[in-house]
Amino acid sequence: MIPHLWNDLEGTFFPESALDYMPEDRLREVQLQRLKAVTALAYDRVPLFRERMTAKGAKPADVRRLEDVRRLPFMVKNDLRDTYPYGLFAVPMSEVVRLHASSGTTGKPIVVGYTAQDMDVWKQAIMRSLYSAGFRRADVVQNMYGYGLFTGGLGLHGGLEGIGATVIPISGGNSERQIMVMKDFGVTAVCSTPSYFIHLIEVAQKMGLDFKRDLKVRRGVFGAEPWTDHMRQYIEAASGIKAYDIYGLSEIIGPGVGNECEYQDGPHIFEDHFLVEIVDPATLEPVPDGQEGELVITTLSKQAMPVIRYRTRDITAIDIRPCRCGRTIRRIRRISRRSDDMFIIRGVNVFPTQIETALLKTEASLPHYQIVLTRKSGLDQMEVRVEVTGDMLRDSVGEMEQLQKRFARSIEQITGLHTTVTLVQPGSIPRSAGKAKRLLDTRNEA
Amino acid sequence: MKIRQLSVFLENLPGSLSGLCRILAEAGVNLSTLMLSEAGEFGLLRIITPDVEKAKQMVEHAGYAATISEVVALQVPDRPGGLASVLAALESQGISVEYMYAFAMRTGGDAIMIFRFADMDRAVVVLQKAGIGVFTAVDLFKT
Ligand SMILES: [Zn+2]
């Protein structure tokens, strides 16, 4: 008997959520069974995985206990790029019913595929996400995630339909229209990146609307970029809604790897589908539960593209304390840092190398530069500081301003992001061991 | 006829101008005139000095970005409408001024102003035809 199955406000039964409350030993048993199966599948069908197993002298039969996952090789984002587009698929294309791709970052994008069963797994994971955040069939939901190749929009869409909510597939952008729809359609719940929603709160204020009085929005799931408790407090205080963190990444499945429950204390991971480990990003050795490190995820149920020991670059810890909600699936701490240079701004992945490419399009030689990320009234801002060299310098303020604009345009063409370019004096960007510090991220200092 | 001027890139930060002046003073560079032109977060400091090459070396050595460009130094009559008459002579020939600034005032004499034109060569011809005094570097630094 699991009392928490009936813990929602309407007292209705939601069978999918039963999996969130599986007895722990049963959950580990399911995980082991599935880990064995996914290891065998990848070994049989994915050459890259088989080669790496062989190099390690490992065989699928070596997985006897859950801890044996540590015998398996890691995967990183580059593996998805190097095998572009279908090199990691474990099924023929006739079995693949959906493709998604990441925003093209350095060169090629990454492509992920789903079988019909994968789509089901994904949909159910998102249904469980939404349900734990209190979304119900009576909700009218404005889905402001981007629709298209990005996993966010269509992923959430499927889950929202799954729980029977009314979906408004509005996608991102056009802030005033978003507010108008929110008001006129009687929207009760939203899906958005946190920074975009904070922006909307301010747009609503400018339009003379009081979020709490004039709008019916009561809750939202927010993700696709790291965000802080400070942002949550702001969102909740300024709009009167409850803001829940939804965790996911395209390489694994998209949104729906985990989601916060009503206690809003870090996302519960849907462990029956995703096996999580925390490793030291430098040594790749496992760290004890509860300690911080890089999150590594293995997909336990996916067929089209099984992903084994994927290094997410997200820094977090597994929270071993039982949650007051009664779910047995464990939580991770909310992600606010990433372990490598790649940064996420307004839901877009950006690499410093892209900025370099943009600068080199404008100037023959690469100037020293620094990317500065700040958060201004909740919206992420990117500033690129460029050191002026004698070669770049012209005896005309107008020409220097033109140069600034050319840099900004070039960066926008490559990343799709609006940016401020600031010209600075040579040597003003801090260097360590001769290398300029390329990224200064102050977004989480607020 | 043209004067070589040093332009230095400066961020609009407290102390960036004074720091640069200190470097030049310590190097013994004699500054005849300085003019700061600003645009938002940055500015260009324009320097007229007899030691333009040395000044460039010094500021670059101190880590500034600098470039040498050409300007002309004109004699502007010290009477009402003096500047207007110079500008009128240029305008009538379609010469546009990119910027200008005061150089110095000779005691009891005319003003000297530094001009930068879009087309420097043609400007010099026009100025000479109009009988406006154009200083050579030698003359300028004697004043
Ligand atoms: Zn919970």
Image: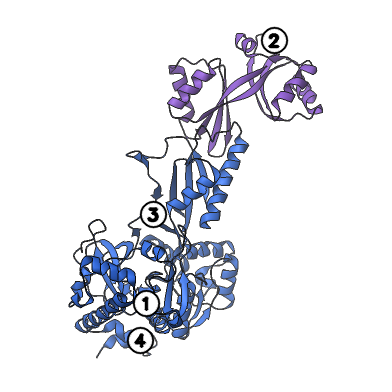
The residue at which mark 2 appears reads as: B109
The verdict on a common chain for dots 3 and 4 is yes
Helix or strand or loop: what does disc 1 sit on? loop
The chain to which mark 2 is attached is: B
Give x and y (percent) for residue B59: 47, 25
Kind of residue at badge 4: Glu
Report crowding for label 1: few under 14, some 14 to 19, many 20 or more residues within 10 A (C-alpha).
many
Q: Nearer the viewer, mark 3 or mark 4?
A: 4
Name the image quarter holding residue A307: bottom left
Question: In the image, A228: left or right of A204?
Answer: left
Q: CA distance from mark 1 to mark 4?
A: 27 Å
Kind of residue at badge 2: Gly
Mark earlier in primary sequence (3, 4): 4
The residue at which mark 4 appears reads as: A16
Helix or strand or loop: what does disc 4 sit on? helix
Q: CA distance from mark 3 to mark 4?
A: 38 Å
Letter of the chain shown blue in the rendering: A
Instruction: Say whether residue A191 is visible.
Output: no
Q: CA distance from mark 2 to mark 1?
A: 90 Å
Kind of residue at badge 1: Ala
Q: Nearer the viewer, mark 3 or mark 1?
A: 1
**Relative to the observer, which residue lies in front, B43 or A425?**
A425
The chain to which mark 4 is attached is: A
Helix or strand or loop: what does disc 3 sit on? loop
Quarter of the image with the C terminus of chain A in it:
bottom left
- Rendered hue of chain B is purple
Q: Is residue A445 above or below residue A160?
A: above
Name the image quarter holding residue A169: bottom right
The verdict on a common chain for dots 1 and 4 is yes
Residue at (55, 33) in percent of width and height: A393
Instruction: Say whether residue A2 is visible.
Output: yes
The residue at which mark 3 appears reads as: A446
